Amino acid sequence: MSHNAESTAFRSALEVIRAVEPRVADAIGAELTDQRESLKLIASENYASPATLLAMGNWFSDKYAEGTVGRRFYAGCQNVDTVEALAAEHARELFGAAHAYVQPHSGIDANLVAFWAILADRVESPALKKAQVRQVNDLTEADWFALRRELGNQRMLGMSLDAGGHLTHGFRPNISGKMFDQRSYGTDPATGLIDYDRVAEAAREFKPLILVGGYSAYPRKVNFRILREIADSVGATFMVDMAHFAGLVAGKVFTGDFDPVPHAHIVTTTTHKSLRGPRGGMVLCQPELADQVDRGCPMVLGGPLPHVMAAKAVALAEARRPDFADYAQRIVDNAQALADGLLRRGATLVTGGTDNHLVLIDVSGYGLTGRQAEQALLDSGIVTNRNSVPQDPNGAWYTSGIRIGTPALTTRGLGTAEMDQTAELIHTVLTQTTAGANADGTPSKAKYTLDADLADKIARQATDLLAPHPLYPAINLT
Ligand code: DSN
């Protein structure tokens, strides 16, 4: 691929857009500039390849394709079939999965598909048999609810939010918290690590229908073999949400007990985090759940997004190349270098380090809330997000943590030496930021003071760090 072709493609696209609404073209250009100039440490973000980005900007967006490959509710889906089948094939091969469903629009959607599939498998199949009907639509509503009450156990056991679990694992601001009676497993207060004996105990007491593994802010490997054994011991379905670490599974950094695919009945993911694809979701499952999973649209999803499925096929093809394994390993090497750099300078890290792509700094040691730290870092050109730490006294809004991750900077080509320099920049900002006070003199959880000249200096240093690693080097919009 010539550099020229990428540049021409994006420049031409912007020219076409500019002719209709120049402010959109300007915003797209400005977003590239902003992303190029900031030290992106948001653990859930990345930079998709030009091929992946371009696969999304076309007439596949115009097509309705409800249904599945070869079985659509609309005519003329032959090309959508091609890209959906390709994306699913790449996903199956990449992850060694029996079945892949690539339609979910996001991680929440993928989880909803999985929840429905599990409920339907557990409730619908026996219910249909009992009512001697062929499909759920043939049940009266009263029959359906009666049977679900009789047969349904809608309990979910997942990792608690402040230990690093995700909202969609049964928490109230998400529909999963309404669909399921939820109980959480946390982490050991002394080590910050999952205590599998405690998970087993909770499972024995609660008898969940679904045991959920996976996280969005836990900086360690999870032993999925043990979690599967726990699920089996109480007859639960074992579901893993690998959205954050799918790239590490794809790149074979997480193998054996730490690869969820051979152990879980069903695995969900997003495609845009460490996996470095387009913004979207995906479900992998064992054969017995495949029929229910494929009913995702229209059961819980709107019409599939064929342009995004095309981009998923491209990104998954990229992830099957040998260099993706090297990329995945470098993500972890960088996260460990960042963690070591912070620890050496005196930071407190949840679990004392990392063995995945993310690091969780407990910023209370700097006398700050997560919100103050997040803003002070942003003032200094360092983009992170605030995050709860286990047993967080500041709740989910202000928090006591900053979550940082390395997938994006690793894509740009930064290495371990630059991670140490990044640790220095973060530590300098956090030590030089002072928590502010409210008008009545009480401590504020949001206000802070950071010398503007220092923030500018750090931002310049951050830009210098990025300079040898230009983002999308082939793309010149001017
Ligand atoms: N919002 C994603 C994250 O940042 O982890 C998870 O949904």
Image (tube, rainbow, N blue to C red):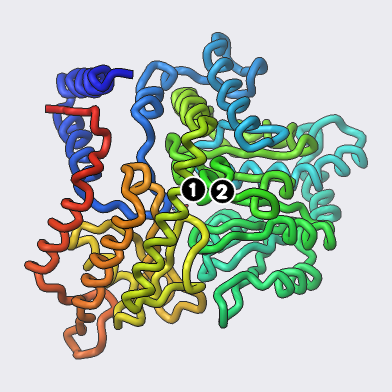
Say which residue label 1 marks.
329
Tell me the tag on residue 253.
2
Q: Residue 357 or 403: which is nearer the viewer?
A: 357
Locate residue 204, reporting x and y percent.
Answer: 81, 70
Q: Number of numbered discs present?
A: 2
Q: Mark 2–mark 1 contact, CB under 8 Å? A: yes
Q: Measure the alpha-carbon separation of dots 2 and 1.
A: 6 Å
Mark toward the start of the polypeptide (2 vs 1) = 2
- Secondary structure state at the residue bearing disc 1: helix
Q: Is residue 323 above or below residue 344?
A: above
Q: Residue 184 or 95: which is nearer the viewer?
A: 95
Locate residue 319, reporting x and y percent.
Answer: 51, 34
Locate residue 152, reporting x and y percent.
Answer: 80, 54
Residue at (23, 65) in percent of width and height: 425
Q: Is residue 5 rendered to the left or right of residue 76?
A: left
Residue at (36, 55) in percent of width and height: 416
- The residue furthest left is 453
Can residue 153 be seen in the rendering of this structure?
Answer: no
Residue 301, image quadrant = top right
Locate residue 264, reporting x and y percent.
Answer: 72, 49
